Image: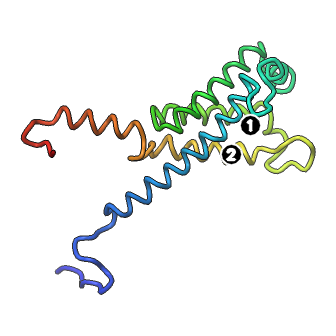
Amino acid sequence: MAPPSLPWRVPGLRRGAPHHRARENVALLVVRVVLAWIFIYYGGGKLFGWFNGPGIHRTSLFMATVAHLRPGGFFAVLGGVIELGGGCLVGLGLGARLGALALLGDQVMAIITVTGANGINSLSNHPGYEFNVTLLTLAAVIAVFGAGRLSVDATVDHRRTRASAPLSARRP
C-alpha cells in the first residue's frame, strides 16, 4: 500500500530534485570562491609579496625559525605553490579535488608546525588554530563533494561524456 499523498507535495518531485541540486551547486561555488580568495591571497604573499605579503625571503626565514622546517627556502616555495596553485585550482573548479586535498594538507602542516601548540583560541600574540581548522574543513568539503556543476571540471566532463555517447542518444 502506497503512503498517503501529502497536500504540500508536488507530484513527481522527490528528494534530490533539480532545485535541490541547484542550491548545492551554488553552495559549492561559494565555498570554492571563498577558499580560493583566501589561499590566493596567502600564497601570492608568500611567493611574490603580493597584498603586502612577506615575500619569499621573509617566508623562508619564518619557515626555518618559527615552523622549524629546513631548508626554509624549499618549504617557503612549496607552501606558496600549494596555496597559490591550490587556490587557483579550487577557484576555477579545475582539478578541484586534488587542489583541495593539497590545501587540506597545507593546513594540517600549519597546525602541526606553528599554531597547534597555541591551542584553539590563543589569547597571546600568537594565533591559535581555529582559522586553520576552518580552512581545512572548507577544503574537505570540496575534496569530498567535488567542485559541483558550476566548474571547469563539470564542463569538461559533460563535453567528454556527450562526445562519447552514440549519435542516437545525443540531444541537440
- Residue sitting at the far right: 124
**Alpha carbons under labels 1 and 2: distance apart:** 8 Å
Element class at badge 2: helix
In the rendered image, which quarter is residue 115 located in? Answer: top right
Q: Nearer the viewer, residue 149 or 75?
A: 149
Task: Please tell me which residue is depicted at 56% across the width and 32% down the height of the picture.
Answer: 88
Looking at the image, residue 134 lies above or below residue 55: below
Quarter the N terminus occupies? bottom left
Q: Quadrant of residue 87?
A: top right
Q: Residues within 10 Å of mark 2 (few under 14, many from 20)?
A: some
Q: What label does residue 133 carry, if any?
A: 2
- Circle 1 packing at 10 Å, graded few (<14), some (14-19), many (20+), is many
From this view, report whether residue 104 is shown above or below residue 19: above
Q: How many marks?
A: 2
Image point (38%, 47%), residue name: 149
Looking at the image, is mark 1 or mark 2 earlier in the sequence?
A: 1
Question: In the figure, is residue 97 to the left or right of 49?
Answer: left
* Residue 42 against residue 60 in the figure, above or below: below
Residue 29, horizontal then vertical, whole percent: 50, 49
* Residue 111 x/y as whole percent: 74, 37
Query: Which quarter of the figure is the C terminus placed in?
Result: top left
Judge whether 75 appears above or below 4 on screen. Answer: above
Amino acid carrying label 2: it is: Val
Residue at 66% from the left image edge and 20% from the top image edge:
78
Mark 1–mark 2 contact, CB under 8 Å?
yes
Q: Which residue corresponds to mark 1?
A: 111
Amino acid type of the residue that numbered disc 1 sits on in the rendered structure: Ile
Residue under the point 51% across and 43% down: 142
Q: Is residue 93 left or right of residue 10?
A: right
